[in-house]
Image (tube, helix red, strand yellow):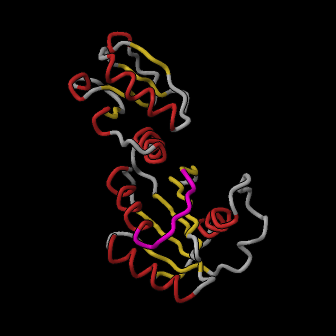
């Protein structure tokens, strides 16, 4: 992702977008619009300065304030928005969630309620362009999994919601890089095919 370029002559816009990219942990280069070449995967600029630009452009005004969603926006726009967003959820007292854009891990989080999960997934859908959303929920707590699946299906009717056999997700097969246990299980759930709701 090193071929992301901020190209704006507005100091205010530059500092806003640079701050968002740093918070999201994304590298970038900085140019004036007149210095742009075709070698960048994605150009971040203002809506006014985007007029006439060729290639993939993300306008500063359309960027989220959430670093995880910014990461998703940058990857999605760089890749043309044609990958699926895949979310794995480990239901329990705390809800571990991991999101991928295609095979790229975007973020992992823990939520305290199903309503918080649904609200955040709505933000993901609204802000990260993709070819579809797949939500895979582990069946460790079958009642909670079914309720969560129902809530997500109602909140996001275009999403494909699957219930996944959770056996073995506590094992260390997939490299989860020191994630908390609920998020690690969610990552393993995300990569398994499930039964559609």
- 81 or 7, which is in the foreground? 7
Residue 52, compared with residue 97, is above or below; it is above
Q: Residue at x 39, y 48 (%)?
A: 81
Above or below for 63 versus 134: above
Give me the residue at 58% from left, 76% from top: 93
Q: Quadrant of the N terminus?
A: top right
Q: Quadrant of residue 95?
A: bottom right
The residue at the point 45 percent across, 84 percent down is: 147
Q: How many marks?
A: 0
Q: Would residue 124 appear left or right of 193 to someone viewing this image?
A: left
Q: Residue at x 53, y 58 (%)?
A: 99
**Where does residue 73 sit, x and y in percent of width and height?**
41, 43
Q: Position of residue 22 (x, y in %)?
A: 51, 31
Residue 52: percent from left, percent from top: 23, 23
**In this picture, residue 3 sits left or right of residue 166:** left
Looking at the rendering, the stretch of residues picked out in magenta corresponds to 107-115
Q: Nearer the viewer, residue 189 or 193?
A: 189
Image position of 164 (left or right of 122): right
> Where residue 67 appears, x then y in whole percent?
47, 42
User: Can you tell which quarter of the image residue 149 is in?
Assistant: bottom left
Q: Tell me where residue 97 sits by quadrant.
A: bottom right
Residue 2 part of the magenta-drawn span:
no
Q: Residue furthest right?
A: 172
In front here: 101 or 153?
Answer: 153
Classify the position of the C terminus by image quarter. Answer: bottom left
């Amino acid at each position: 992702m090193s071929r992301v370029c901020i190209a704006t002559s507005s100091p205010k816009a530059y500092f806003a977008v640079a701050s968002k990219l740093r918070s999201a942990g994304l590298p970038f280069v900085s140019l004036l619009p007149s210095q742009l070449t075709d070698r960048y995967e994605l150009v971040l600029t203002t809506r006014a300065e985007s007029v006439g630009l060729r290639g993939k452009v993300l306008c500063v005004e359309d960027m989220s304030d959430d670093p995880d969603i910014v990461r998703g926006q940058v990857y999605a726009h760089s890749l043309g928005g044609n990958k699926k967003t895949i979310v794995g959820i480990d239901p329990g007292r705390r809800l571990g969630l991991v999101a991928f854009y295609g095979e790229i891990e975007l973020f992992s989080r823990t939520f305290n309620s199903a309503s918080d999960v649904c609200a955040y997934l709505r933000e993901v859908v609204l802000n990260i362009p993709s070819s579809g959303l797949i939500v895979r929920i582990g069946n460790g707590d079958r009642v909670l999994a079914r309720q969560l699946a129902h809530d997500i299906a109602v909140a996001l009717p275009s999403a494909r919601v699957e219930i996944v056999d959770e056996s073995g997700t506590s094992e260390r097969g997939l490299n989860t890089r020191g994630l908390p246990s609920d998020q690690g299980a969610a990552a393993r759930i995300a990569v398994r095919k499930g039964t559609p709701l």
